[in-house]
Image: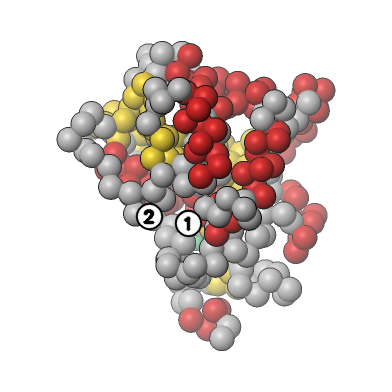
């Protein structure tokens, strides 16, 4: 069945102009209005993101573990970027916290940390690195129930998570519920408007049919967060990768400045405030 026949409107902006931009990857649809690239899959589809929970098959977790030393700089830069708007430490939750590398930066800066990580291998590394001082929940965000009688969060961070979820609204909705009145959500995700998407076309690595279901543009992500109720939504394109060397990192910053002018960097950073209730 061609999914294009079933999908009449964009799940983010309700736009009716839906096309199939990649002939060899017909499951990917594109909204001509907000630029969102998306696949329509049932939320219980067992083929999705399976590798993350299966320790033997979890190549992604093994790669992250092997790269950990090279990722130190990445965690540092990411922490600086997120902490910019949060001079006072508070309570932070990271969804998909991996080995806990980013949360460690928060803990050092005095934050009270908590993580969600469904991969058993990564969760074990995170738990060991914190010596049990940071709760790491094993449930997926789709099924987790948080105890909201305890103090909700000042900050929720989701690095490369939202593109994996079958329901595009789930993560922003849950985060909105879990944040304090003045709390902030910070997301990082691939950019559907990136220059690599146009140069590499169907071989673009982000077009992973069983992993990435929603690849946002700055426009679609802003719209999604605002329609969930968030205020002060800011979406900034950025360049760089987890294991850039210092020299490459400097080069990427220069190229990134040019690409940012065009909105075509490889990733998006989004920050959004819940606002007064
Ligand atoms: Zn749209």
Residue drawn at (65%, 38%), measured in percent from left and top?
64
Which residue is found at the position 82% from the left and 23% from the top?
247
Mark 2 in CB contact with mark 1 (< 8 angstroms): yes
Residue 104 at x, y percent in the picture: 51, 22
- SS class, disc 2: loop
User: Residue 32 is drawn in which quadrant?
Assistant: bottom right
| Image quarter hosting the N terminus | bottom right
Lower sequence index among marks 2 and 1: 2
The residue at which mark 1 appears reads as: 165
Secondary structure of the residue carrying tag 1 is: loop
Where does the image place residue 148, in percent across and percent down from the top left?
Answer: 21, 38
- In the picture of the structure, the residue carrying the numbered disc 2 is 142
Q: Where is 213 relative to 196, above or below?
A: below
Q: Residue at x 17, y 35 (%)?
A: 149
> On the picture, is 116 further left or further right than 256?
left
Q: For residue 271, which quarter of the picture?
A: top left
Q: Nearer the viewer, mark 2 or mark 1?
A: 2
Q: Position of residue 185 (x, y in %)?
A: 40, 36
Residue at figure coordinates x 66%, y 43% from the top left: 62
């Amino acid at each position: 069945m061609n999914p294009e026949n079933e999908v009449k409107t964009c799940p983010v902006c309700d736009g009716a102009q839906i096309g199939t931009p990649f002939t060899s990857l017909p499951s990917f649809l594109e909204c001509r209005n907000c630029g969102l690239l998306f696949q329509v899959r049932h939320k219980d589809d067992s083929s999705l993101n399976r590798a993350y929970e299966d320790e033997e098959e979890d190549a992604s977790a093994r790669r992250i573990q092997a790269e950990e030393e090279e990722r130190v700089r990445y965690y540092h830069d990411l922490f600086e970027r997120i902490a910019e708007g949060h001079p006072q430490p508070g309570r932070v939750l990271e969804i998909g916290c991996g080995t806990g590398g980013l949360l460690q930066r928060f803990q050092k800066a005095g934050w009270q940390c908590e993580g969600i990580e469904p991969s058993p291998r990564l969760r074990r590394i995170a738990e060991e690195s914190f010596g049990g001082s940071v709760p790491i929940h094993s449930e997926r965000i789709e099924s987790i129930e948080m105890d909201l009688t305890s103090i909700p969060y000042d900050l929720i961070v989701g690095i490369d998570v939202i593109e994996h979820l079958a329901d595009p609204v789930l993560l922003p909705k849950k985060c909105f519920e879990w944040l304090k009145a003045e709390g902030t959500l910070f997301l990082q995700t691939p950019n559907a408007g990136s220059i690599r998407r146009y140069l590499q076309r169907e071989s673009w690595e982000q077009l992973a049919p069983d992993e990435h279901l929603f690849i946002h543009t700055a426009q679609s992500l802003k719209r999604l967060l605002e329609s969930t109720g968030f205020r002060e939504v800011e979406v900034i394109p950025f360049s760089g990768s987890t294991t850039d060397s210092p020299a490459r990192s400097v080069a990427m910053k220069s190229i990134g400045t040019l690409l940012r002018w065009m909105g075509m960097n490889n990733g998006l950073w989004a920050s959004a405030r819940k606002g007064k209730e």
